[in-house]
Amino acid sequence: MGTESVDHSPIEALTKLLLTFSLKRSLYAVLGVWCALIFLGIHLYIDLSNSHAGDEEKGGNSAKSFARLVAEHAEGTFDRADLVLERAVKLLPTAELSQARSLSDTRRESLQTELHELQMRAHGVVSMSMTDETGYVFANTVGQPPGGFLGDRPYFLALKNGDREEPVISEVILGRISKMWGLQVARKIVKSDGTFGGMVVANVSMSGYLTDFYSKLGLPAASIVTLRDFEHRILARYPSNEGIYGKSFPPTFGKDITFESIGDVFGYRANLAVDNVDRTYGLMKLNGYKIYAIVGLPQDAIMSSWLRSLKQAIIVFLLAITGSAAATILYIRKFNSDRKILAFSSLLDITKEELIVTATHLSDEVRARASSEKSTNLFFERQIVGMAITSPEKGWLQVNDQLCHMLGYSRDELFQKNWAELTYPADLASDVEQFEKLLVVFEMLLPVAPF
């Protein structure tokens, strides 16, 4: 007889279906969270890259704009000083120039008053002086008596030994009398015969005018502003650093860029050895002067907005990672829990099937044995001769009615005796011998018996 199939209840089937669906849904949700995290990371990276490039470009443009402003301010300052000098060289006739050392006090005072009036028209000029062809100072606007000497100054020698008509701008100089740093804008005085007759020089204050202007530009902290000549010597600097005035600091560009190749305005990035600060620089050459302006803005200030965005993006991404990790942990816990439930349910199904199979086999065996016993009983009871089944000890196990009738005993009485007691004494020995032989044969056949 075959085994019967397990009949699952609708509730059990529905429970398994819901658990399986829940696991799949949770898995898809976790995968969706991590996919969203990847897309978030890509979006943040692209956004930060674009904003970084934008802030870099904006910083470079700001540096170049400030450099243009500083250069135009310096041009205007030097141009105004030169206009004053052009008028000053005409104050003294050539005839008086040859007698400059012997001018009367009245004439000298008149000349100095005119120089002072011109000085007041040029913003940033704090003093003016006039020299003869030897560098002897015979007039000034600071009230000093005549007798000063400027013949050893490089800007005086450049005018005296050169043939240029344009003004000469000196290196940054510490005033002998004022003890203040400044730039000297000088123009030669030409005699009627065309020879060098002296110079008029205007002192442009660096600390009182140029750097004051630079301090009002609203530059971020750690910014620097410098004016340099074409030999890259520092002419003016903000913040002030007297230790580097007059020293040469060539700017560092790319490999394929030279100072001579730079046109109107140029931007670059460098780290100065002076203060080891990374800056973006704007450079612009002045028109008509061998001077250029440089403005350096610190990268920290330029990228401050981007750095804030970077910190915010890192926080957002870390929070997203934390949330994704938490969702994954919850899924793993749910997965393990539901898997145990499904495994236990499957185990119950298997156990139930085994029990049903076992019960079916037992039922079949019981029915078979009952049928066999019934057949045996029918076989015993329907015989016309006496029949019995005995034990190896010669006791009665089963007898039929015909045997009871033949022997004259009831079943209960026979079960109290054995067949040896009822056998004719003369035949007992032979019967016992045959019975024992039968037992030997039975014991030999027993191991291979179908039952």
Image (tube, grey):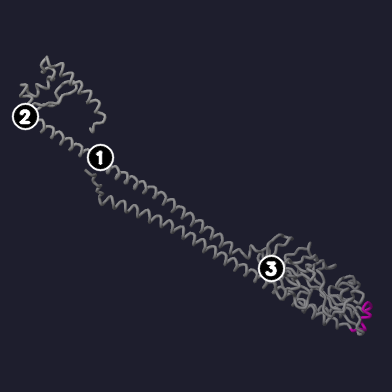
- Magenta-colored segment: predominant secondary structure: helix
- Residue in the image at 64% along x and 62% along y: 300
Residue 331 is one of the magenta-drawn residues: no
Residue for badge 1: 358
Occupied quadrant, residue 441: top left
Task: Look at label 3 and name its amino acid.
Answer: Tyr
**Residue 272 appears anywhere in the view:** yes
| Left or right, 333 with reference to 157 | left
**31 versus 164 height, above or below:** above
Q: Is residue 148 visible to the viewer in this orientation of the structure? A: no
Q: Nearer the viewer, residue 343 or 413?
A: 413
Left or right of 451 on screen, residue 37: right
Query: CA gap, disc 2 to disc 1?
Result: 41 Å
Front: mark 2 or 1? 2
Quadrant where the image shows the N terminus = top left
Q: Which mark is residue 184?
A: none
Mark 3 highlights which residue?
268
The label on residue 384 is 2
- The local crowd at label 2, few if under 14, some if 14 to 19, many if 20 or more residues have their Cα within 10 Å, is few
- Distance Cα–Cα, label 3 vs label 2: 131 Å
Q: Quadrant of the C terminus?
A: top left
Distance CA(mark 3)–CA(mark 1): 90 Å
Name the foreground residue: 281 vs 14.
14
Q: Residues within 10 Å of mark 1 (few under 14, many from 20)?
A: few
